[in-house]
Image (cartoon, grey):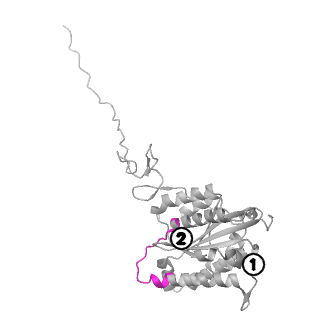
Amino acid sequence: MADSTSTCSLVVIILDTNPAWWGRQSNHGNPKLSLSKCVDSLMTFANSHLMMNHLNKIAFIAAHSNFSHFMYPKRQQREVTDIDTNIGEINDGKYELFDRMNNQIKDEIKSLVLKNMEVEFENDSLIAGALSMALCYIHRMEKEKPIGVKMTSRVLVVKASEDNPAQYMNLMNTVFTAQKQNVVIDACILDNDSGLLQQACDITGGVYLKIPQPQGMLQYLLWVYLPDPSTREQLTLPARVQVDYRAACFCHRNLIDIGYVCSVCLSIFCSFSPICSTCQTTFKIIAPPKLTKKKSKKPTT
């Protein structure tokens, strides 16, 4: 185990708050997948992570259908977080840091729901935008960490809505950036399998798991995602799933098995086009040679 006085772990939790998906669950009367229970499980997971080490840090980002929102910590709170973690004050039997974090996340979720009640939403969420915000925050925390402290970072994506192939390029850019920064991306899937997050977890060395029993979400969070990547090698975790490495075409954003690749910018298309729509390169089409009729020789007399 690493020295707790010199090593800290940062976990950025991205919660899919798509109102269309969560609204369908409530309309169907399914109490196993309510948003409030999901948030309670995530806050218990966050509190457990902070109790593992007094230097550990947590962050929450909401991936909405039309925007991404940073819920915790707020900018004005980041300067006093390190001071507050050393304060042992107790409020009604609760540690002050945990109580403040839980209340703030609940208030942010409530404001998201109330402010967007009359807006029409899509069936997908901006996971790529939330991942970009998470990587920017991780990069900032790396720059602001105390001298002599080693920080490991990872991102936990809790996703419920469907994939949007239109986010393929943005998501892949964030995934390769995370790989370069040694940031592990984990995925906790509540409903529909995500081929894009399967690739993200496989590339960065994270864990992809579709929860078979949503009512046991907290148990899966504590069992699979609470241990850091170095400790997971010593545990018996769910087997890795077969990764769907299909790419999305640049023309219609559909996942394809066979396509055409531009030799200049490496853009992928599902159908042939003489001009690349990305880099405007014109391809020369070499036609087969024309078949000429052989002249018949005149008979000699």
Within the magenta stretch, is there residue 122? yes
Name the residue beneath numbered marker 2.
192
Give how far across and how far down residue 135 sits, in percent: 59, 63
| Residue under pointer 1 | 86
Q: Is residue 161 above or below residue 268?
A: below
The percent coordinates of residue 86 (x first, y second) are 75, 78
- Provide residue 6's location: percent of width, then percent of height: 77, 65
Q: Which residue is at a point 52% across and 87% down the rendered structure image?
A: 29
Question: Which residue extends farthest top?
Answer: 301
Of discs 1 and 2, which sits in the foreground?
1
- The quadrant the N terminus occupies is bottom right
Q: Is residue 4 left or right of residue 272?
A: right
Dominant secondary-structure state across the stretch colored magenta: loop
Q: What amino acid type should be assigned to the residue bearing mark 2?
A: Asn
Query: Which region of the structure is painted magenta?
Result: 112-128
Q: Quadrant of the C terminus?
A: top left
Q: Residues within 10 Å of mark 2 (few under 14, many from 20)?
A: few
